[in-house]
Structures are given as C-alpha cells and as structure tokens.
Image (cartoon, rainbow, N blue to C red):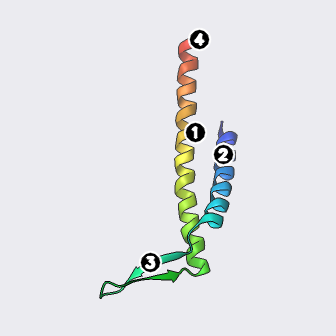
C-alpha cells in the first residue's frame, strides 16, 4: 500500500501542477485606497509558487480520499471473511 500511496501522490501532484500552470489565471485584480480596481500581472515566481500551493492542497485532498477508500475496503474485507 505504501508504494501505491506514493505513486498516487506523485502522479496527482504532477498532473494537477501541469493543469494548474497551463490553465491558471496569471492576472489578479488589485484595489487601491480609493477603491479603484485594476488588473496586475503576476511575476513568474509568484505564479509558480501560487500553482505549487494549489497543487499541494489538491494532492492532499486526493491522498485523503485514497486513504479513506483503502480503509473502507479493508474494513469490508475483514467483515466478509
């Protein structure tokens, strides 16, 4: 199971990172003290770290779901035997 867990973690992070980097929004809306909003372009490093953060959060959720599915499957196997 441990090897399966790391494979899921690696592949899910890679897939989510590539999709988020490719499809992500590179502009953010900034508001000044007067209340005027204007778009601002993120630098490459800001966009990279934003994408990494999103990828880590989504990967953690995916790993939690995989863990819970494996736990439920183990319980159902114990009850059936």
Return the disc, 2 or 3, that comes first in the chain's sequence: 2
In this rendering, is residue 79 above or below 43?
above
Q: CA distance from mark 1 to mark 2?
A: 8 Å
Helix, strand or loop at label 4? It is loop
Query: Could you say where residue 34 lies in the image, as x and y percent from the top left?
Result: 29, 88
Return the disc, 4 or 2, that comes first in the chain's sequence: 2
Q: Are marks 1 and 4 in contact (CB under 8 Å)?
A: no
Return the disc, 1 or 4, that comes first in the chain's sequence: 1
- Residue appearing at x 53%, y 40% in the figure: 65
Q: Quadrant of residue 33?
A: bottom left
From the image, tell me which residue sits under label 1: 66
User: Dot 1, crowdedness within 10 Å: few (<14), some or many (≥20)?
Assistant: some
Mark 1 vs mark 3: give the one in front: 3
Q: CA distance from mark 1 to mark 3?
A: 36 Å
Query: Could you say where residue 70 lies in the image, as x and y percent from the top left?
Result: 58, 32
- Residue appearing at x 50%, y 83% in the figure: 40
Q: CA distance from mark 4 to mark 2?
A: 28 Å
Taking the view exactly as shown, the residue that stands out farthest to the top is 81
Q: Are marks 1 and 2 in contact (CB under 8 Å)?
A: yes
Query: Could you say where residue 76 lies in the image, as x and y percent from the top left?
Result: 54, 20
Return the disc, 4 or 3, that comes first in the chain's sequence: 3
Q: CA distance from mark 1 to mark 4?
A: 23 Å
Q: Are marks 2 and 3 in contact (CB under 8 Å)?
A: no
- Residue appearing at x 58%, y 65% in the figure: 52
Question: Looking at the rendered structure, which numbered label has been put on residue 38?
Answer: none
From the image, tell me which residue sits under label 2: 8
Say left or right for 40 vs 52: left
Helix, strand or loop at label 1? It is helix
Q: CA distance from mark 2 to mark 3?
A: 35 Å
Q: Are marks 4 and 3 in contact (CB under 8 Å)?
A: no
Say left or right for 3 vs 75: right
From the image, tell me which residue sits under label 3: 29
């Amino acid at each position: 199971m441990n090897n399966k867990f790391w494979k899921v973690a690696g592949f899910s992070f890679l897939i989510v990172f590539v999709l988020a980097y490719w499809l992500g929004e590179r502009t953010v809306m900034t508001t000044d003290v007067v209340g005027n909003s204007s778009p601002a372009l993120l630098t490459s490093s800001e966009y990279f770290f934003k994408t990494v953060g999103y990828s880590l959060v989504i990967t953690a959720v995916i790993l939690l779901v995989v863990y819970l599915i494996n736990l439920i499957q183990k319980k159902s196997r114990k009850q059936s035997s």
